[in-house]
Image (spheres, rainbow, N blue to C red):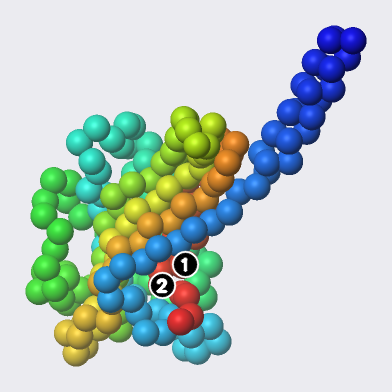
Amino acid sequence: MDTVIKRILALATLAAFSVLAGCASTKVETTGTPLREPLCQVGAPALTTVVYWGPQWRPDQKEPPLREAAALRGIEDFLAHTSCLSVTGVHRLPAGEAQPTDEDLLRLASTSPLRPERAVLIVVRELGPRLAVGMPVIVEGGTEVLIDVHVLDPRTSASLANTRTSWRNGGIFVIKGVKSLDQDMSAALSATLMHRE
């Protein structure tokens, strides 16, 4: 009889884990000054845009080159799928330097072959899987993107946005690796730059 009860409990536990395992959700939190409207309007003439990006990892960041490659693929994916942007260049900022000021960005944008209507700075602070084990939740995981995004209008020198976005996809009993990081990066940029209030 004990064996039957143990089997029933094991099957019930397995069924509960199976139901919960696929329950991933996305949570986006943005602080700072977001765009008042999307970076560009789908269907409108393409907005000439130049993009500058670079990482600022925490000191104990694992596999920075892998994450940087995923970040670049994600940035390129976002730009390729945003038809209302005409991108004149995607430029990696020199490693180890301080985040550029508005004046630095305007100077960099002025060297673009076509005078851009927007200059976008993307600083990648976190890009990777996360996993929490303990109480009250036994296992909670997923992936996380933490980016700072600054948008300028080089024609007027106006700052249009200066935000930090924390994008997370996961949940209870969700375990993800690094395979989705480029798509996660693209999704975080879309949530930051193409959202509607």
Give the quadrant of residue 7. Answer: top right
Name the one closer to the observer, 128 or 108: 128
Q: Is 95 on the left or on the right of 6, as rendered?
A: left
Residue drawn at (38%, 57%) of the image: 166
Residue 32: give x, y in percent of width and height. Answer: 27, 71
Q: Quadrant of the N terminus?
A: top right
Q: Amino acid at mark 1?
A: Ser
Residue drawn at (50%, 72%) of the image: 82
Q: Is residue 6 above or below residue 103?
A: above
Q: Is residue 98 above or below residue 96?
A: below
Residue 158: give x, y in percent of width and height. Answer: 20, 85
Residue 187: give x, y in percent of width and height. Answer: 49, 60
Q: Is residue 138 above or below residue 164?
A: above
- Write down the residue under mark 2: 193
Decide: marks 2, 1 in contact (CB < 8 A)? yes
Secondary element at tag 2: helix
- Write down the residue under mark 1: 190
Q: Residues within 10 Å of mark 2 (few under 14, many from 20)?
A: many
Residue drawn at (36%, 62%) of the image: 165
Q: Amino acid at mark 2?
A: Leu
Q: Is 82 on the left or on the right of 57, as rendered?
A: right
Q: Disc 2 and disc 1: Cα gap in Å? A: 5 Å
